[in-house]
Image (spheres, rainbow, N blue to C red):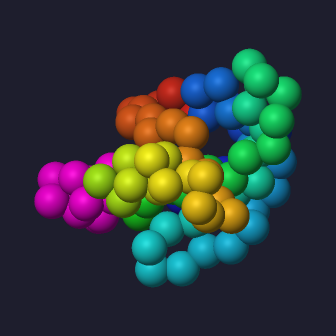
Amino acid sequence: MALSAGAHLGPYEILSLLGSGGMGEVYKARDTRLDRTVAIKILPEGLAADPQFRDRFEREARTLIHAHRFLAANAFNVLRVQRPTIT
């Protein structure tokens, strides 16, 4: 599912596609609440529908959040949205 520049996903405005592969798509986006640039990963529908994979993905995100001071990348939010909320 490709998102276009200007689309909104919750408080995030999509700016551009950074890359895609078997694990999903990664977009450059702007957090409109805090006016900062972020990266958003969108899981493929098949993986997003798998409760075990979703749990693993969320565990990895929480690990990244807690380890942020040691890493170059940070996770700030794990957001579950239904596809129709993407505008």
Q: Is residue 73 left or right of residue 44?
A: right
Q: Which residue lies furthest to the bottom in this view?
A: 22
Q: Is the magenta stretch mostly helix, strand or loop?
A: helix
Question: Which residue is drawn at the image coordinates 81% and 43% (left, top)?
Answer: 37
Q: In which quarter of the image is the C terminus?
A: top right
Q: In this view, does 9 lie to the left or right of 66?
A: right
Q: Residue furthest front?
A: 70
Question: Which residue is drawn at the image coordinates 45% and 47% (left, top)?
Answer: 66
Asked whether 66 falls inside the magenta stretch, the response is no
Q: Which of 76 and 50 is in front in this view?
A: 76
Question: Which residue is drawn at the image coordinates 22% and 53% (left, top)?
Answer: 55
Q: Is residue 14 left or right of residue 54?
A: right
Q: Which residues are drawn in magenta?
A: 46-58
Where does residue 82 sit, x and y in percent of width and height?
A: 39, 33
Q: Residue 18 falls in which quadrant of the image?
A: bottom right
Where does residue 9 sit, x and y in percent of width and height?
A: 61, 34
Q: Quadrant of the N terminus?
A: bottom right
Residue 15 visible, this angle? yes
Q: Residue 29 falls in which quadrant of the image?
A: top right
Q: Residue furthest top?
A: 33
Q: Is residue 84 left or right of residue 86?
A: left
Where does residue 80 sit, x and y in percent of width and height?
A: 39, 36
Eyeballing the image, is 20 above or below 32? below
Eyeballing the image, is 4 above or below 2? above
